[in-house]
Image (tube, rainbow, N blue to C red):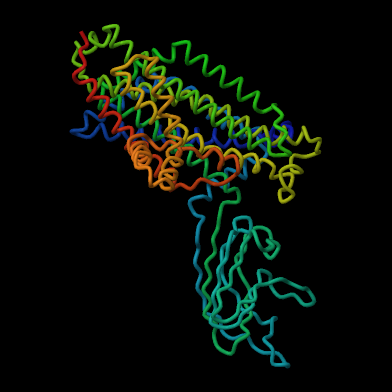
Amino acid sequence: MTLVMLGQTIPDWANNFLMPIWLLGLGALLGILVLLVLWAVAFGVGLLPGCGKIRMAAHEAPRIVQEGPMAFLSVAILAMAGFGVLGFALMRDSLDIVESLRRLPVVGEVPYQVLVEATPRDELGEADAAKEATFPVNVNRRELDTIQIQSSENVLIYSKPFEEGVRREGFDVAAGIPFNWSRNSSSIDDFPDGMVTELYVVNRGNRPADISMVVNLRPANPEVRHIVITAVCVVVVTLLYFVLAVFMPRLSAIALATFKSEVAAPMFLILVGLGVVGLAIFVILPYNTLGEDIKMLKDNGLTLIMLFGMLQAVWAAGTSVSEEVEGRTALTVLSKPITRRSFIIGKYVGILWTVLLLFVLLGLWFLTAISYKVIYDAKENSTESPVATVGSQFDRDEVWQVCHQEVAETVPGLALAFLETAVMASLAVAISTRLPLLANMVICLSIYVLGHLTPVLVSSSGAAQQFEIVVFAAQFIATVLPNLESFNVAPAVAGGVEVPWSYLVMALLYSLVYSLIAMFLALFLFEDRDLA
């Protein structure tokens, strides 16, 4: 009762735009719980004979996550998790969300198979609906998504029992013809509220009907899937940092020193400050797009965060590699038991941690701004409810799902922007082994422009086959330089087009391969560099 009373104190507009952020908070909370379980398991395994290294790593875990980038990321994760806990008392749909999350492992395709005898006939020779057979199922109306039915005889399937004088809707399934029902294209009123434990079948044929049915269930609130995705991201990032710190201590030490120096530098604070202010201005800036302002917000916000991330990466590469080499600081570091390979790769990893923190801070603020933009545009249009500007297919209780959809469509764009920044950071580190900061920035800017023009150059070379020099130049650029346009999905994100998981995986593999090649180039250029 107390939770409900607290939830009622939150205005509708605040509950709607904060709900997507609360789901991220629940994901952070779930990720922390998984990490605690893994930590306890590591302690238990460490007690076994021959597992002393695991026991030592488990003891070192609290110290490791409190230093360097994980110290900052932990604060952000804990803040999100704290909001996740607080949301149980504030969000009105909190109990529905928890129930959907609990049901998530059991939803999916559920097959049913039954043999129904021919229904007895009435005086007119028709199948007597009053003597229908039952079909045992276990389906919740709120979780129904699609139904596929096949039958060897003509059958009628109802979700409600026969009642004299009462009309009821049902599925008319013809023999041998697949029948498909979809929640989006049909009326959900065919099913009663709550759980459906029986379907009622009238077999209109003269032989037993062999009925096969596949029910596809989805969570009542399918948005809970993003809670799991957020938790996986939290666990993967934490474990990755932990593995580097335990199994690559020298490389991790260089990365930690690089991160600390870059985060403490004025450039990082300036970029974060400008990003926060810029994204806030983008929300209230009138774009005069006749109701499509949120698309402009997504496009501008993704571009701003990506450019700030690249600027931070190139600047960090110039200051932490080039200036240390020129200032003889690298010679002092390499006089210790640290190889040139650990030095260069550690610098790159430290730059990535810095860029990741920048993306997390600005990304969370950006997603909050997008969620609020749905409400803000409705108020600017003087509508009583945001639903009027979002679409009449959503009722008052589902406005938060519209906000969440806008947020969810933007997250892949942020991920691809980070992957593009990682590629540019690897090239910046390679260039900084030989050239100073200014030359590095000019070359990286040229690579950025040409990398986004690669598809245009390739298509243009196909139309100019008679000019061999043009064809050669286009093919050379497409082969040597990264195809950065493949990471640019800002127009798709702004247009509400879903980015498939397969595309994200391929982009991740491309980023890893190209960054690895750039690191080999950096090691080659740095190997014979005279540091004295």
- Nearest the viewer among 149 and 370 is 370
Q: Residue at x 26, y 11 (%)?
A: 330
Q: Is residue 134 above or below residue 514?
A: below
Q: Position of residue 513 (x, y in %)?
A: 32, 37
Q: Quadrant of residue 235?
A: top left
The answer to whether one can see residue 391 in this image is yes
Quadrant position of the N terminus in the picture: top right
Q: Is residue 119 above or below residue 454?
A: below
- Nearest the viewer among 309 and 451 is 451
Q: Position of residue 356 (x, y in %)?
A: 44, 26
Q: Say how many tags the image has.
A: 0
Q: Taking 215 as reference, is 334 left or right? A: left
Q: Residue at x 52, y 80 (%)?
A: 210
Q: Quadrant of residue 94?
A: top right
Q: Position of residue 403 (x, y in %)?
A: 64, 39
The answer to whether one can see residue 77 in this image is no
Q: Taking 509 as reference, is 82 left or right? A: right
- Nearest the viewer among 426 and 235 is 426
